[in-house]
Amino acid sequence: MSLVPPSPATTLATPRAMDDLDQLEAQSIFILREAYRKLRPLSLLWSLGKDSNVMVWLARKAFMGRVPFPVMHVDTGKKFPEMYAFREEYTKKWNLDLMLGDCPPVEEIDPSLPPAARSAARKTAGLASLIEKHKLRGVIAGIRRDEQATRAKERVFSPRGAGHRWDVRNQPPEFWDQYATPYEDGMHIRVHPLLSWREIDIWRYIERENIPLVDLYFAKNGKRYRSLGDQDITSPIDSNASTLAEVIAELENSKTSERAGRAMDHESEDAFERLRVAGYL
Amino acid sequence: MTTNDLPASLRAAATPIVIVGHVDHGKSTLIGRLLYDTDSLQDGKLAQIVESSRKRGLAVEWSFLLDSLQIERDQGVTVDSTRIPFHLGGREFVIVDAPGHRQFLRNMITGAADAEAAVLVVDALEGAQEQTRRHAMLLRLIGIRHVIVLLNKSDLLDFDQARIGQAEADVRDLLGRLEITVEAFVPASARDGDNIATRSERAPWYTGPTLVEALASVPAPASRLALDFRMPVQDVYRFDDVRYVAGRIERGVIRAGDRIMIGSQGQQATVAEICRWHAPENPVAGAGESIALRLEPDLVPDRGDLLFPAQETGTAPIRTARLRTRLFWLRGEPLRVGESFTLRLATAEHDVTVASIDAVVNLDDLTLSPGDEVPPDGFAEITLVASHAILFDPFSPGYSDGRGVLVDRFQRIVGGAPLLGAAELPDGAHAIHPTASRVSLGQRRALHGHDGGVFWLTGLPGSGKSTIARAVESELVAEGLRTTVLDGDTLRAGLCSDLGFSPEDRRENIRRTAHVARLLAESGQAVIVALVSPLIEDRALAAQIIGEGFHEVHVDTALAICETRDPKGLYAAARAGRIQDFTGVSAPYEAPQAPALRLETDGALAGTVSGFREFIEAKLKH
């Protein structure tokens, strides 16, 4: 075997310095590649919102321009028309294998939940039936720690037991980039590649990478949506930010919670945790 | 470029800071206070704290900020780690809150492992406690490089310089024994805000930094670019007829044209291209980047193969099948010699067996002493053996080298193993390198239609163990279960024919039987052991060897009935003194206190056997 001498040391190229977004991106790519390797069948939840678009984008980064597993949209039937148009357009442009899931009528949902949480729980039921139908072992979801205190407790790989329940008191240890992959029949793992991202990081990354978005996020007539859920339980915030740069500037000066416009988070102190234990994102 | 110092135009990532310490020494209060003092609260949060405190009829509790889960408030302890961003000058930090309740150690590790610096909160009045020592030990083992000690509740010592000096000396001594260098000791009161963000007026003698000043001077992470290149292969893809070797560079730099070595096989290749999608073209990549390589020739490495320079300029990776490692143990049951695990090392997985437990840490005084087992949440130094040579770089705080993790056969993470180096073989010892099965329990289950397990029948001689075992064997096989009976007398006729009935020989008899039972159970069989096994201690040994699949079954027949039956004429012989050490007559029988199943034999045999069969089926088929 002959050894090739190393290239001349005089004009060596140097690696580009990594800023905070580069580091977040590299870590998310690592997580997505772990999920694709360890959890099959695997699918990515595409809610059509800004975070899940970033996630699809990161998957394309991880897999050289393609998403090598299906994406799911759990359709409550109550999304904004702009979102359905966006779904049509980018399923084609990004060459996505799209799986649609329906949600049961609200009458079938636990009546002890407050009204908006009950409405949100429809999505949980729709997701559960997709997971069962496709026997998914891995579900990639775009939640972030900074969104909500309960989500701050999450793991990157978060096992869900039978009935998709989140056992918040008994989570596996997770350190040194080693993720638990316990498996018994009926279990799946929620994978959270954006867990360490903050809202402002998402926006700066969208700006840097030029990732498309539904324009509901941008202000019209003094209002814009900061977070997009169902039409009937999401409200816009007061804002004049009509471009990416203006949204970023607005967020850098804001200390209001992102999910302030999501009704189910505020109905009672523990409503959101009860939703999550039952399988809500 | 040889450092990670960023050009001014680039934003640095937030610096993670973990806050650890004994329960009630004030961690949550400190975090609430820090966020308030640095004005890092979201608008809604302060109102939420006030509202929560008001509802409970309390004054404002800083710790409520973190106790965001209902269950935490109910129990009054922080259950899991949370991460909270805060700003200090131009720099961003992320606070990781770690719980002080000892049963939640694994949550603390989850939070702390990525931290750049740690704040160890110690109650100035109480001094270092059990969890203070435990957390400090863990800071060392997970590799936190910068430690700041906050002597909290210093107001309880009236900020008295002499008394605080004594508290500081005690903690300094403790951390010194762990080879942890402390950046600063800060006398403080988190509740009142002394020396957190603002200098305390109650300790004019103190000239060191406030906590915020100490945090601000934590240096940026050490550069990994100047070290030799290492990339563990994460996966290999083939898209559109191009093969991509994907991975994250753990340290060093790789350039197109570089010659690399692949794993331990000695294969070499040249990097033909560094591939990224939707990123500026750059023929070079450095530590931290997740990239894909095209190799020339187009070899197909395995996941876990380490890529490193073909011509080492620095230190080559260690190559050994015997590894010396530190250990932090996270399983609820103790670790014992002979147990097998998967060692995960970056993306590699290796089958390893614990060859020896070389030293166990005594948490009362942090001394090392020999031991047979590592207790739950314990620390130790152990030797692992693998069936083949493993390639690794020794653990070093602040770097990703040598970060081993032990995983059990249920894919649960049970321990952290910062690898120290190759283990010397003890003089005169014959090296054994056990191999572990690659067949999963799920595959076995699919093959047999059921799990394996051991049903250990214990009872007096003549109680009916063998009769029940043989009868249930027939029924199980008729039901399609793979079944083996290990009968005491049968074993003594062969495998154990060299053994007598002394306590030592009885114990050896049980040890051998248990190992055979374990092998059969692991191969997916229902194993029925029929053995007098009179001593609790000996059955505990069997349970330990067999592990989770062990089920103790007491064949509970009264001595008088056994003696009446006396199928082999042994009781008569023992009473006549012709047999020594006969269980029930001249040797003790210790009945199980809480067997998994108790079989009574005063009814019809058929009923006893079918009840036993149902029990076995319920355990193995689910």
Image (cartoon, grey):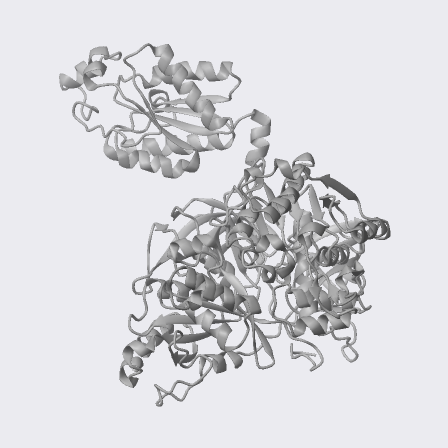
Residue B114: x, y in percent? 54, 65
Residue drawn at the location 67% of the way across and 59% of the way down: A28
Residue A159: x, y in percent? 56, 46
Quarter of the picture containing the N terminus of chain A is bottom right
Residue B167: x, y in percent? 30, 77
Residue furthest to the left: B576
In this view, B515 is above or below B68: above
Specify the quadrant of the image occupied by residue A237: bottom right
Residue B354: x, y in percent? 45, 49
Residue A249 visible somewhere in the drawing: yes
Residue drawn at the location 37% of the way across and 72% of the way down: B175
In this view, B237 is above or below B62: above
Q: How many numbered callouts?
A: 0
In this view, A24 is above or below B518: below
Horizontal side of B445 relative to B473 (left or right) equals right
In this view, A160 is above or below B379: above
Residue drawn at the location 77% of the way across and 76% of the way down: A12
Residue A23 visible somewhere in the drawing: no
- Residue B164 versus residue B362: which sits nearer the camera? B164
- Residue B249 versus residue B487: which sits nearer the camera? B249
- Residue A134 versus residue A126: which sits nearer the camera? A126
